[in-house]
Image (cartoon, helix red, strand yellow):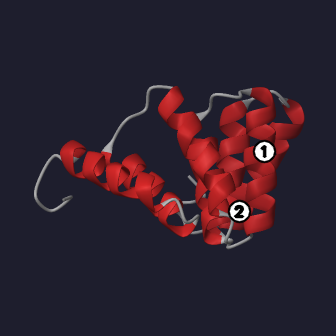
Amino acid sequence: VYIRLDQPQRALDTYLTASESFPADISSLLGTARVYDMLNDGEAAIASYKKVLSIDASNAEAIACLAAHFFYFDQPEVALRFYQRLLQMGIVNAELWNNLGLCCFHAGQYDICLGCFERALLQAEDESMA
Protein backbone atom coordinates (compact mmCIF):
# COMPACT_ATOMS: atom_id res chain seq x y z
CA VAL A 1 0.00 0.00 0.00
CA TYR A 2 2.83 2.41 0.85
CA ILE A 3 4.41 1.82 -2.55
CA ARG A 4 1.22 2.90 -4.29
CA LEU A 5 1.12 5.99 -2.09
CA ASP A 6 4.67 6.78 -3.20
CA GLN A 7 6.14 6.25 0.26
CA PRO A 8 8.94 3.74 -0.33
CA GLN A 9 10.73 4.43 2.96
CA ARG A 10 7.60 3.57 4.93
CA ALA A 11 7.16 0.43 2.85
CA LEU A 12 10.77 -0.49 3.54
CA ASP A 13 10.27 0.00 7.28
CA THR A 14 7.20 -2.24 7.17
CA TYR A 15 9.04 -4.96 5.28
CA LEU A 16 12.03 -4.78 7.63
CA THR A 17 9.75 -5.09 10.66
CA ALA A 18 8.07 -8.12 9.08
CA SER A 19 11.47 -9.64 8.29
CA GLU A 20 12.56 -9.25 11.92
CA SER A 21 9.35 -10.86 13.18
CA PHE A 22 9.39 -13.65 10.61
CA PRO A 23 13.02 -14.16 9.46
CA ALA A 24 12.18 -17.11 7.19
CA ASP A 25 9.40 -15.28 5.32
CA ILE A 26 10.51 -15.00 1.72
CA SER A 27 7.79 -12.58 0.63
CA SER A 28 8.93 -9.89 3.08
CA LEU A 29 12.56 -10.35 2.00
CA LEU A 30 11.57 -10.07 -1.65
CA GLY A 31 9.52 -6.98 -0.89
CA THR A 32 12.51 -5.47 0.88
CA ALA A 33 14.74 -6.20 -2.11
CA ARG A 34 12.22 -4.68 -4.54
CA VAL A 35 11.97 -1.48 -2.51
CA TYR A 36 15.75 -1.25 -2.30
CA ASP A 37 15.80 -1.60 -6.10
CA MET A 38 13.26 1.22 -6.38
CA LEU A 39 15.46 3.38 -4.16
CA ASN A 40 18.51 2.57 -6.32
CA ASP A 41 20.30 0.91 -3.41
CA GLY A 42 21.71 -2.00 -5.38
CA GLU A 43 23.99 -3.35 -2.67
CA ALA A 44 21.17 -3.67 -0.13
CA ALA A 45 18.91 -5.22 -2.78
CA ILE A 46 21.55 -7.80 -3.66
CA ALA A 47 22.04 -8.63 0.02
CA SER A 48 18.29 -9.19 0.34
CA TYR A 49 18.17 -11.41 -2.75
CA LYS A 50 21.08 -13.44 -1.35
CA LYS A 51 19.15 -13.89 1.91
CA VAL A 52 16.20 -15.16 -0.11
CA LEU A 53 18.43 -17.70 -1.85
CA SER A 54 19.87 -18.84 1.46
CA ILE A 55 16.32 -19.74 2.54
CA ASP A 56 14.92 -20.89 -0.82
CA ALA A 57 17.63 -21.85 -3.28
CA SER A 58 15.15 -22.18 -6.14
CA ASN A 59 13.52 -18.75 -6.02
CA ALA A 60 13.41 -17.67 -9.66
CA GLU A 61 13.03 -13.94 -8.99
CA ALA A 62 16.09 -13.80 -6.75
CA ILE A 63 18.17 -15.84 -9.19
CA ALA A 64 17.15 -13.64 -12.14
CA CYS A 65 17.82 -10.41 -10.25
CA LEU A 66 21.25 -11.59 -9.14
CA ALA A 67 22.04 -12.65 -12.70
CA ALA A 68 21.06 -9.24 -14.04
CA HIS A 69 23.14 -7.57 -11.34
CA PHE A 70 26.26 -9.55 -12.21
CA PHE A 71 25.73 -8.96 -15.93
CA TYR A 72 25.44 -5.19 -15.55
CA PHE A 73 28.43 -5.07 -13.22
CA ASP A 74 30.63 -6.64 -15.89
CA GLN A 75 30.67 -10.22 -14.67
CA PRO A 76 28.91 -12.08 -17.50
CA GLU A 77 30.45 -15.44 -16.57
CA VAL A 78 28.81 -15.35 -13.14
CA ALA A 79 25.52 -14.16 -14.64
CA LEU A 80 25.71 -17.02 -17.13
CA ARG A 81 25.75 -19.54 -14.28
CA PHE A 82 22.63 -18.02 -12.74
CA TYR A 83 20.78 -18.02 -16.06
CA GLN A 84 21.81 -21.64 -16.67
CA ARG A 85 20.42 -22.45 -13.24
CA LEU A 86 17.06 -21.04 -14.33
CA LEU A 87 17.16 -23.26 -17.41
CA GLN A 88 17.88 -26.28 -15.21
CA MET A 89 14.83 -25.39 -13.14
CA GLY A 90 12.69 -25.65 -16.28
CA ILE A 91 12.11 -21.96 -16.91
CA VAL A 92 12.26 -21.49 -20.66
CA ASN A 93 11.24 -18.27 -22.41
CA ALA A 94 12.55 -15.86 -25.02
CA GLU A 95 13.88 -13.37 -22.47
CA LEU A 96 15.95 -16.00 -20.71
CA TRP A 97 17.47 -17.26 -23.97
CA ASN A 98 18.22 -13.69 -25.03
CA ASN A 99 19.94 -12.96 -21.71
CA LEU A 100 21.93 -16.16 -22.05
CA GLY A 101 23.00 -15.11 -25.54
CA LEU A 102 24.10 -11.70 -24.29
CA CYS A 103 26.09 -13.25 -21.45
CA CYS A 104 27.79 -15.66 -23.84
CA PHE A 105 28.59 -12.80 -26.22
CA HIS A 106 30.12 -10.65 -23.51
CA ALA A 107 31.98 -13.63 -22.07
CA GLY A 108 33.52 -14.33 -25.48
CA GLN A 109 31.65 -17.61 -26.05
CA TYR A 110 30.55 -16.69 -29.56
CA ASP A 111 29.81 -20.25 -30.69
CA ILE A 112 27.14 -20.66 -28.00
CA CYS A 113 25.61 -17.18 -28.24
CA LEU A 114 24.20 -17.66 -31.74
CA GLY A 115 22.35 -20.79 -30.66
CA CYS A 116 20.90 -18.93 -27.69
CA PHE A 117 19.67 -16.10 -29.90
CA GLU A 118 18.12 -18.61 -32.32
CA ARG A 119 16.25 -20.27 -29.47
CA ALA A 120 15.10 -16.86 -28.25
CA LEU A 121 13.64 -16.18 -31.68
CA LEU A 122 11.92 -19.57 -31.69
CA GLN A 123 10.44 -18.93 -28.25
CA ALA A 124 9.19 -15.44 -29.15
CA GLU A 125 5.42 -15.37 -29.21
CA ASP A 126 4.92 -12.42 -31.53
CA GLU A 127 6.87 -10.35 -34.01
CA SER A 128 7.48 -7.51 -31.57
CA MET A 129 9.42 -9.85 -29.27
CA ALA A 130 11.43 -11.22 -32.15
Residue 108: give its label: none
* Residue 109 point in image, percent of width and height: 52, 59
Check disc 2 and give the amino acid type. Answer: Tyr
Residue 36: give its label: 2
Task: Examine the rendering and report whether any part of residue 96 can be seen.
Answer: yes
> Could you tell me how many numbered marks the image carries?
2
Marks 2 and 1, the one that precedes in the sequence: 2
- The residue depicted at 55 percent of the width and 40 percent of the height is 84
* Residue 104 point in image, percent of width and height: 51, 58
Left or right of 127 in this view: 68:
right
Residue at label 1?
50
**57, above or below 101, in the image:** above
Front position in the image: 22 or 126: 126
Left or right of 126 in this view: 109:
right
**93, above or below 113, in the image:** above
- The residue depicted at 78 percent of the width and 28 percent of the height is 55
- The residue depicted at 71 percent of the width and 27 percent of the height is 56
Label 1 neighbour load within 10 Å: few <14, some 14-19, many 20+? some
Check disc 1 and give the amino acid type. Answer: Lys
Label 2 neighbour load within 10 Å: few <14, some 14-19, many 20+? many
